[in-house]
Image: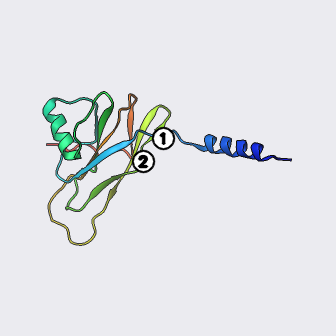
């Protein structure tokens, strides 16, 4: 016969066993359509770059000891209106997985080549960062 205490413990173990290793917290996001540079991880930057990133992300400051920046690029697109979206970050097998997708524009869009990207400020992660799916090849200048 199951008691209330036994049932509570079974539910607690079941929930704990199903829990995924959550990824770093996302503090801020900023979209752009005109940056070239590919997807990358920034763990340290000079003063000017740090100030520019903080301004774009609309945060007061970036603490490089506790935070890092991830840039997800959607590659070159033939028109405006494309956007990059990320899903929750996931830690799996000691790697940070950045799940993302490109959103296709709807309606009338500017007829100009763009490079949609999303910049996110997250908790610092010391291991490898993997993009899923792999980002398009870096644009050539």
Under circle 1, the secondary element is loop
Residue 88: which numbered mark, if any? Answer: 2
Residue 22: which numbered mark, if any? Answer: 1
Q: Position of residue 76 (x, y in %)?
A: 22, 52
In this view of the protein, which residue sits in the foreground, 64 or 32? 64
In this view of the protein, which residue sits in the foreground, 8 or 112? 8
Can see residue 114?
A: yes
- Reading the chain from its start, which is encountered first: label 1 or label 2? 1
Q: Is residue 80 above or below residue 117?
A: below
Q: Residue drawn 32% across and 60% down?
A: 103
Q: Quadrant of the C terminus?
A: top left
Q: Position of residue 28 (x, y in %)?
A: 30, 46
Can see residue 135?
A: no
Q: Residue drawn 18% across and 55% down?
A: 114
- Disc 1 vs disc 2: Cβ atoms closer than 8 Å? yes
In this view of the protein, which residue sits in the foreground, 130 or 141? 130
Q: Residues within 10 Å of mark 2 (few under 14, many from 20)?
A: few
Query: Would residue 109 be found to the left or right of residue 3 on screen?
Result: left
Under circle 2, the secondary element is loop
Q: Residue drawn 24% across and 29% down?
A: 44
Q: Position of residue 5 (x, y in %)?
A: 75, 43
């Amino acid at each position: 016969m199951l008691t209330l205490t036994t049932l509570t413990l079974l539910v607690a173990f079941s929930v704990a066993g199903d829990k995924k290793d959550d990824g770093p917290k996302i503090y801020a996001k900023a979209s752009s359509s005109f940056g070239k540079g590919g997807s990358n991880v920034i763990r340290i930057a000079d003063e000017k770059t740090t100030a520019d990133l903080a301004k774009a992300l609309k945060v007061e400051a970036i603490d490089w000891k506790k935070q890092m920046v991830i840039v997800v690029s959607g590659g070159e697109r033939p028109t405006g209106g494309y956007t990059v979206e990320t899903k929750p970050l996931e830690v799996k097998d000691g790697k940070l997985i950045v799940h993302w997708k490109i959103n296709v524009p709807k309606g009338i869009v500017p007829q100009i080549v763009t490079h949609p990207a999303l910049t996110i400020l997250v908790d610092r992660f010391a291991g490898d960062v993997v993009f899923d799916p792999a980002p398009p090849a870096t644009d050539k200048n």
